[in-house]
Image (spheres, rainbow, N blue to C red):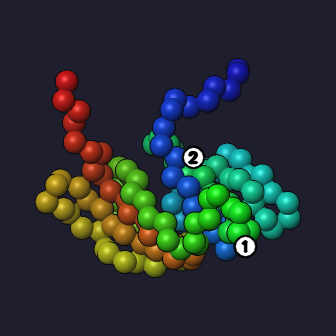
Amino acid sequence: MTAVPPPPQVWPTLRARDARKLISFLVDAFGFEEILVSADGDVVHHAQLRWPPGGGIMLGSARDDADDPWALPPGTFGAYAVTDDPDRLCARALAAGAELVQRVQDTDYDSREFLVRDPEGNRWSFGTYRGEPIPG
């Protein structure tokens, strides 16, 4: 079987002080799947993690290079991802060491969601809200 790239999507990107540790955390805590890690020792130049319901993220090690065109401070990232079971995912994330910011709750826009912080300080919100229907 030939591997086929996914259709065009949005891929949020972040930098990490310890990219290898963050990759392991994201896999263990949230269920991301490691697809690719291009690295020299502890320096991750590019990593791609897939979110099983669709899409994913890209990340790499923070650099001290003044000419870095993608100089994002570690710990400043935030993302929302859709999950069908936020209660189970929140328990998994907390067991893996995520810091609870907002407990699982129901919203006025018909979502059940929670917010946690990863070891780098990034914020991750997971919920059942899939967005408004597209007019058609």
Q: Residue furthest top?
A: 1
Q: Is residue 54 above or below residue 84?
A: above
Q: Position of residue 54 (x, y in %)?
A: 47, 41
What is the quadrant of residue 39 in the picture?
bottom right
Q: Position of residue 92 (x, y in %)?
A: 48, 66
Q: Is residue 67 left or right of residue 126?
A: right
Which residue is label 1 attached to?
64
Q: Position of residue 86 (x, y in %)?
A: 35, 59
Residue 24 marker: none
Q: Is residue 66 left or right of residue 54?
A: right
Q: Residue at x 18, y 29 (%)?
A: 135
Q: Residues within 10 Å of mark 1 (few under 14, many from 20)?
A: few
Q: Is residue 130 left or right of residue 30?
A: left
What is the quadrant of residue 134 in the picture?
top left
Which residue is label 2 attached to?
50
Of residues 14 and 19, the one drawn nearer to the viewer in this rendering: 14
